Image (cartoon, rainbow, N blue to C red):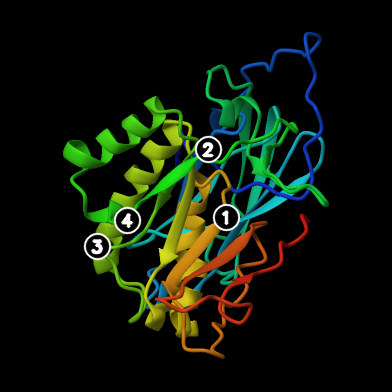
Amino acid sequence: MKQSLTLLAALLLAPLAAPFAAEPGSAERAILPAAVDVVTETWRAAEITFESAKAYADPLNDAEVNAVFTSPSGRAYTVPGFWDGGRTWRVRFAPPERGVWKFATACTDISDGGLHGKTGTLRADRYQGKLDIYRHGFIRTAPGVRYFMYADGTPFFYLGDTHWSMPREPFDAMFTCVVDRRVAQGFTVYQSEPLGANFQFADGLAEADLPGLRDLDRRFKYIADAGLVHANAQLFFPPEISNLRDTAYTAQWFDPRTGAYLAPEPFTSQQDAPGEGGRWRIPAKPSAADWVLLVKASPGGRSPNDRQLQELPQPLPR
């Protein structure tokens, strides 16, 4: 198959409502170095790149790509792909289960042999590092439990503050220094806002937006490599929140691109609250992902109420 495979030390949004089954202990068998398409570790992501057979004038609306990853135990995860310029499409996935996985793609344009019906294998070895987020698994919730926990049930302590203008800070001179400092201080969460981001979805997704998105890729990856859960606000200003077209672009393209790095702390949208009696309308996220979506409001001097601050329901895992 015509595709390139690139490892990324990233994170995948995992189901939040149910723990994963425990993996074998000392009796586990070594995975033979079989001919697989990509090798990674549990809870750490691989990026799979596909080349479409045709150029789309409007990739956002002309095609949609999903990859179904099936675990050794038979559990399936549907992961949306994203367009990354020209004829390049990518899928980012981090396996929560050790063993050899299979994947198969489906494109709404079934005539595109570069995107539809592509198959392959992914081998997940056990994570060998010391970062808790990969040792215990991604963050989840449980019914009736009022705290976050890792996938294996270990309690997760949320400690973080906000880097408001993360996208425009110099990468080496400022950004990495802040991340490294927070790790040294014992923080577990890195909160960020999109102020200064070099992309604009209000007029659609275009090639001009991609450099800014790729810059975010390496920042999100750096945070993930540091072992921090990333609480990222993808939208900030009221026009973005109230324009359903903007949020549709965010859900369809931004989330599949960056979601693999979020580990999976809730996606948040920050905005000034509307006047008394106002209410924001936030569309649901794509059904291909199992995420918690929180909407938080800065009341601008007014006391927030239930009509200004909402928590959207958490979807059940498929």
Q: Which residue is mark 2?
A: 45
- Image position of 131 with respect to 19: above or below: above
Distance from label 1 to label 4 (Cα)? 17 Å
Regarding mark 2 in the picture, which secondary structure is present there?
A: loop
Q: Amino acid at mark 3?
A: Gly
In this rendering, does residue 56 appear at all?
yes
Q: Position of residue 120 (x, y in %)?
A: 61, 41
Q: Tell me how far mark 2 sits from mark 4, CA to CA.
A: 26 Å
Q: CA distance from mark 2 to mark 1?
A: 19 Å
Q: Quadrant of residue 232?
A: bottom left
Residue 266 has which mark?
A: 1
Q: Which residue is mark 4?
A: 164
At mark 1, the secondary structure is: loop
Q: In the drawing, does residue 26 fall left or right of residue 242?
A: right
Q: Earlier in the sequence, mark 3 or mark 4?
A: 4
For the image, the number of numbered tags is 4
